[in-house]
Every structure is written in structure tokens, then in C-alpha cells.
Image (cartoon, helix red, strand yellow):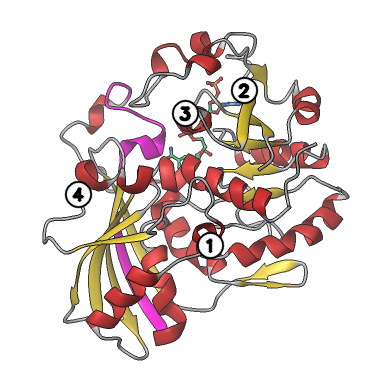
Amino acid sequence: MQQYKVGIIGGTGMVGQRFVSLMEGHPWFRLTVIAASPRSAGKTYADAVGTRWAMETPMPEFAKSIVVKDAEADMEEIARSVDFVFCAVEMPKDALRALEEGYARLECPVVSNNSAHRWTPDVPMVVPEINPEHLEIIPAQRKRLGTRRGFIAVKSNCSIQGYVPPLTPLKDQYGLSKVLVCTYQAISGAGKTFETWPEMIDNIIPYIGGEEEKSEREPMKLWGSVAGDHIENAARPSITAQCLRVPCTNGHMAAVFASFDKKPGKDEILEIWKNFKGRPQELELPSAPKQFLHYFTEADRPQTRLDRMTENGMAVCVGRLREDAQYDYKFVCLSHNTLRGAAGGAVLLAELLCAEGYITAQ
Ligand SMILES: NC(=O)c1ccc[n+]([C@@H]2O[C@H](COP(=O)([O-])OP(=O)(O)OC[C@H]3O[C@@H](n4cnc5c(N)ncnc54)[C@H](OP(=O)(O)O)[C@@H]3O)[C@@H](O)[C@H]2O)c1
């Protein structure tokens, strides 16, 4: 397989640090550029991150001496020197939209973690196992941007990464009609640790700005279809969500209730989950989990601390499937929010884009 030169925009942040860690030993991707705000530009990566390093593993040696660039001021130079960029930046939405489009217009594909372009009609929002066919919209986006190589592809919000996968293989077969979900989200989802957010110790905050809207709306785009020059959203199911911040470092848990037009049997659901595979498994992409959905039979699993790293944090863990008195079924699920839900999901998307020929090495 070819080697690709990769840049990380926002490499000093929580998700950016995950990207840097995931580039260590990656068989296809070689990290050559890290960019961030003017605060970090000109410093070595080690100095720019300083005490903010929040990963469980040490900062990779190869990254320490990379001199951080300015994501906006050095855009042309960065776009010229890499095959594509990952983007995970905390900025106002308009500025972020312009930043990502700037790279795409300079013929540099952007694989983004940010929400700024999730609702741009010709930008594919992709979980590789769920809607890889949405990449077919890229030629229409390139036409609008007037580019040959450049485009933007995004991943969805971390909150939906646990419950959309187990619902996907049941949705069409049984007519998924109604979903109620409560998420219990880790503090790294806000780019924080207990050191930087001590108020979260021994505390739950019952509000995460914008998260409930994302949790209810984004599945509809993932479950939608390509219609000419845009993605047409799915019309159902109806989803209602409550999102809570809980005192956990990593791993978003969700409690899910679901109803169907035609109620499946419990054994049928378990069999479907066991056999659920997508393009990443078919193509054997380097970051793909072998088993996408892991079902736990123990009554007290999955647990964040024990199970979030299942298959390097790229699998979705499910448990406690049972019938419900008001909905057809209820279950719980867990996914690692900065791995599968952020940087890992974006790396898998980039692998898919390379394998399918949307990103090429220059
Ligand atoms: N954390 C998660 O689990 C998660 C999951 C999914 C999606 N996301 C999304 O990913 C993005 C990054 O989140 P995060 O948690 O990593 O945030 P973070 O830890 O606050 O990091 C923010 C990054 O943005 C950079 N930045 C800030 N202002 C900038 C500017 N004017 N120009 C260029 N770079 C600038 C920062 O650089 P400096 O270090 O130089 O300030 C830093 O690298 C956000 O859009 C977030 O919504 C996060």
C-alpha cells in the first residue's frame, strides 16, 4: 500500500493529540505537519503541548521536535506539502468552515472532526461501517468547489457513535420507528481532564450545549442517501435524546430504547449484531475492528473503564438487551469518544478514502 503524507490541523488539542498518537507506526500514514493557533506556532510540538499532554501513552518521539505551523497563516505551504489533513480545531463555526474550505480549495483533502460542515449538503458525514456509499457525493462537491483533488469529508458527533451502529442493521429489516436515548458522556469529549476541569470530580452536569440536537439529527443524515448533488436525510425513526456529562475520563455510554414496525426476536437481534460487518472489515483497513459490535452477556457490562479499549477503542460495546414495557427493546452501549468517536473514526475514514481512491498520494 502507498504511503501518504499527513498534516494535523489542531494537533495540540485533545483530539489532535489522539491523531498524533495514532500516526505512530501507522502502516500508510506519515505525519509530516502539525498546525494549531498562533499561540503554538513556531514552537516545537513538545513545547507547544507542554503539560497539556493527556494521552495514556507518552508523546511519540518523532512528533516532539516537529515545529508547529499556524493553521491559517501557513495554509498554502501546508496544503502543498501533504496529501491530506485531519482537522480538529476549536474555533467559531464560520471561521472553521472557511478554514476547512480553504484547504479543500487549495486541493488538499480535509478529513474533519469538527461539526462546522456536517450539514453542508454535499459534504459526506461518514461512519465507514454505516454509510460508505455517501462518499459518492465527493465529485459533486468538487464540482462546486472547482477542485480536482480537494474536498471535505467529516465524521459524525461522538455522542451518536455508540447507538447508531447497533440500530443500523435492524433499521430497514424491522422498520425502526422510535428511539429514546440518554447519553452519559466523558469529560474528554469537552477537551478536558480532571486536572483542567476539577468541578467535574464527584459531579454530573445535566447539560452539554448543542449535544441533544446533534444526537437527534445526525443519525438522519447517516441513514440518508445520495440524491444527485446532496445527501437526502432519512425520514425516520423519530429520535429523542438527553445528554449528560459524567465524571469519567474517556468513553461515552448510552441507554437506548427502541421500537419497530415489526418487532424482532431477541435472538434475531443478537445474531444480526454478531454478523454485522461493513466496508472497513471487507477491505481489512488497518484501523478497522475485526468485530464491529461486541455484545456482552454479563449483566454489569459494558463498563467504561473495563471495555472502552475493546479492539483498540474502535469497537462498539453493547449489553443488557431486553424487552421493555413501553418500547420494544432497551439496551446499553459504549464507545470510546476520542478514539472511535473522534480521531480513530477519522483515521478509519481516511483509510477508506485512500482505499477507494478519493485520496491519492502526490
Ligand atoms: N474531544 C472529543 O471527544 C471530540 C469528539 C468529536 C469531535 N470533537 C471536535 O474536535 C474539535 C477539537 O476538539 P478538542 O476537544 O480537541 O479541542 P481542544 O482540546 O480545545 O483543542 C483545540 C485545538 O484547536 C486549536 N485552535 C484553537 N484556535 C485556533 C485557531 N484560531 N487557529 C488554529 N487552531 C486553533 C488549538 O490550538 P492551540 O493549542 O494552539 O490553542 C488546539 O489544537 C472540536 O471541533 C470538537 O467539537 C471533539
Magenta segment boundaries in residue numbering: 176-196
Residue that carries the numbered disc 4 in the rendered image: 303
Q: Are marks 3 and 1 in contact (CB under 8 Å)?
A: no
Disc 4 residue type (three-letter): Gln
Disc 3 residue type (three-letter): Ser
Q: Closer to the camera, 69 or 99?
A: 69
Residue that carries the numbered disc 3 in the rendered image: 21
Query: Closer to the N terminus: mark 1 or mark 4?
Result: 1
Q: Position of residue 274 (x, y in %)?
A: 33, 69
Between the C-alphas of marks 2 and 3, the distance is 12 Å
Disc 2 residue type (three-letter): Ile
Between the C-alphas of marks 4 and 2, the distance is 34 Å
Query: Closer to the N terminus: mark 3 or mark 1?
Result: 3
Query: Closer to the N terminus: mark 4 or mark 3?
Result: 3
Establish whether ligand 1 lies closer than 8 Å to the Cβ of label 3: no
Q: Closer to the camera, 289 or 116?
A: 289
Q: At numbered mark 2, what does the secondary structure look like: helix, strand or loop?
A: strand
Between the C-alphas of marks 3 and 1, the distance is 25 Å
Work out whether residue 328 can be spotted.
Answer: no
Q: Closer to the camera, 316 or 330?
A: 316
| Membership of 190 in magenta stretch | yes
Between the C-alphas of marks 4 and 3, the distance is 24 Å
Tell me: residue 324, above or below residue 139: below
Q: Are marks 1 and 4 in contact (CB under 8 Å)?
A: no
Q: At numbered mark 1, what does the secondary structure look like: helix, strand or loop?
A: helix
**Circle number at residue 34:** 2
Q: Position of residue 152 (x, y in %)?
A: 70, 48
Residue drawn at (27%, 48%), measured in percent from left and top?
206
In the displayed structure, does residue 289 sit left or right of residue 113? left
Between the C-alphas of marks 1 and 4, the distance is 29 Å
Residue that carries the numbered disc 1 in the rendered image: 282
